[in-house]
Amino acid sequence: MGIQHALILFLAVPLAADPLVGTWKLNVAKSRFGSGPVYRSIMVKIESQGDNIKYIVDSAPAAGNAVHYTFAFGYDGKDYPVTGYTSADAVAAKRIDADTVVLVFKKGGKEVVNRREVISDLGKTRTVITRGKDSTGRDIESITVFDKQ
């Protein structure tokens, strides 16, 4: 095969899509809320925006009002704004490997929540391990499991 054929073949093969992208629904039965808030439902839509990723989150806690928040980020460890999330006003993200991302949420420049998100089961499951503090300063720790829709 000549260089021209190899180049055409390379250009014809799309780059792998980010496995986070899609719509994810909380699987309450598989989740363990620990010292974190308990949720009746969470729906997360994750979109690709060029080199960035955008989250649109709609959650219904077991106690309290529904919460809608959004944020977009690059995997460069820099702070990006978060809108509608009372516990944080910024997020920084780093990709650990093809299926693992760490999100660090901050309030006033100080880390408040650390989330490790892992894609498994051939891209059908997203497990989120959350540690940190809620908007009142209470320690939280949970493992939430999401099914791809």
Image: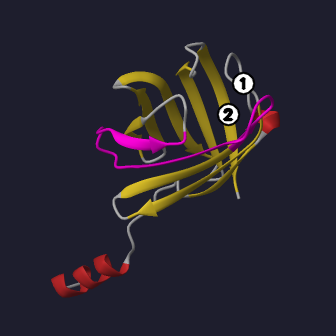
Query: Which amino acid type is marked by label 1?
Result: Phe
Q: Is residue 19 above or below residue 94?
A: below
Q: Can residue 73 be found in the magenta stretch?
A: yes
> Callout 2, which amino acid?
Thr
Disc 2, SS: strand
Single out the residue that lies furthest toward the left: 3
Count every numbered label the image shows and give the total. Answer: 2
Which image quadrant is residue 118 in? top right
The percent position of residue 42, horizontal first and vertical second, equals: 71, 44
Quarter of the picture holding the N terminus? bottom left
Q: Are marks 2 and 1 in contact (CB under 8 Å)?
A: yes
> Which disc, if any, is residue 33?
1
Picture coordinates of residue 128, whole percent (x, y)? 59, 35
- State the residue in front, 83 or 12: 83
The percent coordinates of residue 92 (x first, y second) are 37, 37
User: Could you give the CA–CA distance between mark 2 and mark 1, rounded to whole angstroms?
Assistant: 7 Å
The residue range painted magenta reads 59-84
- Give the SS element for disc 1: loop
Which residue in the structure is indicated by mark 2? 144
Dot label at residue 94: none
Which part of the image, by quadrant, shows the C terminus? bottom right
Residue 73 falls left or right of residue 25: left
- Residue pictured at 28% horizontal, 43% vertical: 76
Q: Position of residue 96 (x, y in %)?
A: 39, 38
Q: Is residue 11 left or right of residue 121?
A: left
* Picture quadrant of residue 69: top right
Q: Is residue 39 above or below residue 74?
A: above
